[in-house]
Amino acid sequence: MTIKEISQTEFEAKIAVAAETDWARLAACIDSRWGSVGTTGNTERVPFVGVVHKDPRLICWLRDVFGGTTSTDSADELSWSHTGERAVDIIRHIIQFMLIKGGQAETVLAYHELGNSKLEDQT
């Protein structure tokens, strides 16, 4: 089951009141083995952040604090994610707290800032 994205206005309201500790916790989640930061698509680079976990408390907290899309897969894992400009906004807030995947986050921002959706994969 997938829960749809919230509106842009709701997203902006949520991130405006998120505490610094919330951003640090989100960075830790994305830095962990359950989190990801990158781009989706083969020809278009769409920024992406997400977390996959079995504990619904984490996914519900992410949704409540940051909005996003949540879903359940066949392995009873829950996921939370944002794509596009919302992912970029999130990355800009959390990059200062990232210890492991900061380089990946910087690459996503670089692709985005270049504005070229058809850059070749460098990995």
Image: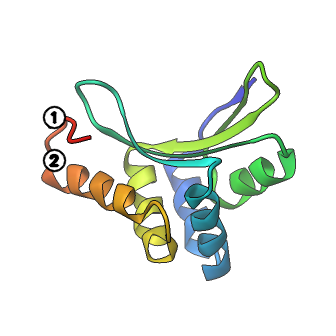
Q: In this view, does 3 lie to the left or right of 15?
A: right
Work out whether residue 68 or residue 76 is closer to the camera in this orientation and state it: 76
**Considering the numbered disc 1 on the image, is that residue within a helix, a strand or a loop?**
loop
Q: Which residue is drawn at 28% across and 24% down?
A: 42
The quadrant of the rendering that contains the C terminus is top left
Q: Position of residue 107 (x, y in %)?
A: 28, 55
Tell me the residue that label 1 is attached to: 120
Q: In this view, does 119 lie to the left or right of 66?
A: left
Q: Residue at x 37, y 55 (%)?
A: 104
- Disc ID at residue 9: none
Q: Residue at x 16, y 47 (%)?
A: 115
Q: Where is residue 84 in the image (x, y as percent from the top left)?
A: 39, 43
Q: Is residue 69 left or right of residue 87?
A: right
Labels 2, 1: front one: 1
- Give the residue type at disc 1: Glu
Q: Distance between the residues labelled 2 and 1?
A: 13 Å
Q: Which residue is drawn at 73% across and 23% down?
A: 73
- Give the residue type at disc 2: Gly
Q: Categorize mark 1 by other alpha carbons within 10 Å: few (<14), some (14-19), many (20+).
A: few
Work out whether residue 46 or residue 8 is closer to the camera in this orientation and state it: 46
Q: Where is residue 85 in the image (x, y as percent from the top left)?
A: 37, 50
Q: Which of marks 2 and 1 is nearer the N terminus?
A: 2
Compared to 97, does 81 lie above or below?
Answer: above
Q: Is residue 110 left or right of residue 25?
A: left
The quadrant of the rendering that contains the N terminus is top right
Compared to 25, does 109 lie above or below?
Answer: above
How has the structure been colored for display?
Answer: rainbow
Q: Where is residue 49 in the image (x, y as percent from the top left)?
A: 50, 48
Tell me the residue that label 2 is attached to: 115
Compared to 78, does 32 lie above or below?
Answer: below
